[in-house]
Image (cartoon, grey):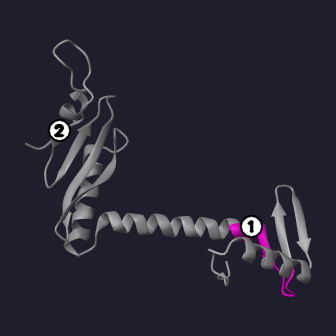
Amino acid sequence: MPLTTKIIRNAKPLITPDGRKTQKCYRISDSKGMYIEIDPSGGKWWRLKYRFNGKEKRISLGVYPDVSLAMARKKRDAFRTLIRKGIDPSQRIKEEKAAQRAEETRQLAASRFKLESDGGLTLQLRNRCLALTPVETMELRSFLDATRPELPKEMPCL
């Protein structure tokens, strides 16, 4: 039987016969692998269970009531479409987050570092600007290369 908003609203944490909350989560299924998980603190999490390359996986669709039943079903359908196309939704989300972090890092670096055409480097440090000559820039680069051997020697331009 598909879930309804009333069922979700009335879902409460499990209680023992003596009236205490248990430490166990439980699930109420909807359809097509989607369910809502009720945790002991009363939190309600939308989840989707699916198989990809023979492995069972699950992915979060959001927290109720921030994500409504209708919105969770739309997300479920979108993820199932990706699965049919041979794309793992959890991997897709990880890649999108990594790309977003890389872009944020690039923007942060661009706002704080400026490499001049003559080879000088300008650093934005809180409320001050520090301009290095080309020689100081080379010395700083050598120092950083020596102290961080695990980083690649040639960093792509940000």
The percent position of residue 132, horizontal first and vertical second, equals: 90, 74
Label 2, residues with CA under 10 Å away: few <14, some 14-19, many ≥20: few
Q: Of all residues shown, which one is farthest toward the bottom?
A: 118
* Magenta stretch holds residue 142: no
**Is-magenta flag for residue 116?**
yes
**Mark 2 and mark 1 residues within 8 Å of each other at the beta carbon:** no
Residue under the point 24% across and 26% down = 12
Dot 1 corresponds to which residue?
Answer: 111
Residue drawn at 41 percent across, 64 percent down:
94
Q: Nearer the viewer, mark 2 or mark 1?
A: 1
Coordinates of residue 69 in the picture (x, y in percent): 25, 44
Quarter of the rendering occupied by the N terminus? top left
Seen from the viewer's position, the closer of residues 41 and 80 is: 41
Magenta stretch bounds: 109-120
**70 relative position to 3: left or right:** right
Q: Label 2 sits on what residue type?
A: Thr
- Counting from the top left corner in percent of width and height, residue 106 is at 64, 71
Residue beneath disc 2: 4
Residue at disc 2, secondary structure: loop
